[in-house]
Image (cartoon, rainbow, N blue to C red):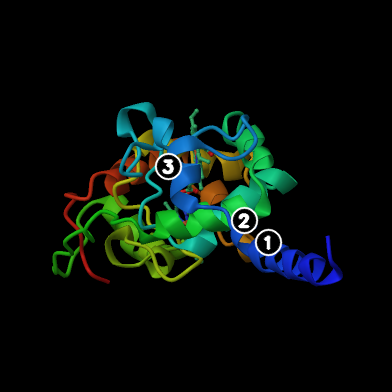
Amino acid sequence: MTLLSRVVIGSALILAWPIAHAADGQKVFTQGGSNPAAMACLGCHGPDGKGIAAAGFPRLAGLPAGYLSKQLHDWRTGSRKQLVMEPLAKALTDDEIKAVSSYLAGLPGDPAPTVRRQQIANDPTTRLALYGDWSRQIPGCVQCHGPGGSGVGEYFPPLAGQPASYLVAQLNGWRDGSRSNDPNQLMVGVAKAMTDDEVVAIAEFFANPASPEVKP
Ligand code: HEC
Ligand code: HEC
């Protein structure tokens, strides 16, 4: 092999390298990661990424990429614990996390829930969702999670339409410490101040986007 051909082959390899290593988000979603322990996401999160409510598997489609990749990294570092997702997140490469997160963020999510304008929240759950309870330092959920719980920006995930059992599990995760990944501990205080009954009621409220909703 001449020196010239070595140089040519060498530069071709260098040029090809980033392409060969850029993970394909759709492939990770439908077929899994390069490590067999990183199972395909669609089996549990549904072929459209909209989750499987009956099984409590959350919707990922249309969630912000920054939020999704943060969750996967949080399972790796242990600030979020869960038996199924923890080993799976650990088996994904950084590149695969990045790729699958941006792929999922680009999938169509649920339409934003209709926000009905009315002045009075006439039941305690709606009041909690909209205005919180300042005597217990609970701000209204929609203050951070957006009108109808439809999510805001990269860091405040949607609650609307997520399975009720999933939402309950998250709130309980903050209460028992198995989820401690909230920036500035924005959620732990809220979750701990709520009663068991309120956790269930607020989860039902957001899980069912048809709930009468009041704009704050
Ligand atoms: C065997 C079932 C299963 C598979 C396969 C699976 N997941 Fe999950 N996933 C779950 C469950 C269960 C939860 C809820 C975990 C919890 O309660 O904290 C979840 C939650 C998540 C969340 C958190 C969503 C949120 O709103 O915070 C992300 C992100 C996620 N999965 C990404 C993925 C990706 C990416 C893949 C594919 C590489 C994948 N999952 C494959 C079962 C699965
Ligand atoms: C001060 C801001 C703030 C308020 C108020 C707030 N949240 Fe959150 N919430 C967050 C942030 C930030 C996250 C994402 C944490 C992370 O990165 O994992 C979150 C995440 C969640 C999640 C997990 C969603 C998922 O996909 O896994 C649930 C459930 C939740 N909040 C419920 C509520 C409820 C119910 C209320 C009202 C009682 C509420 N939040 C009020 C900031 C807030």
Say which amino acid is labelled 3: Leu
Q: CA distance from mark 1 to mark 3?
A: 42 Å
* Rendered image: mark on residue 75: none
Residue plotted at (68% across, 40% down): 90
Image height of 46 relative to 4, above or below? above
Q: Quadrant of residue 46?
A: top left
From the top left corner, tell me how far across and down residue 43 is, in percent. Answer: 41, 30
Question: Residue under circle 2?
Answer: 20
Mark closer to the chain start, 3 or 2? 2
Determine whether label 2 and label 1 are within 8 Å by CB: yes
From the top left corner, tell me how far across and down residue 24 is, in percent. Answer: 51, 52
Say which amino acid is labelled 1: Trp
Residue behind label 3 places its C-beta within 8 angstroms of ligand 2: yes
Question: Residue under circle 1?
Answer: 17
Say which amino acid is labelled 2: Ala
Nearer to us of marks 3 and 2 is: 2
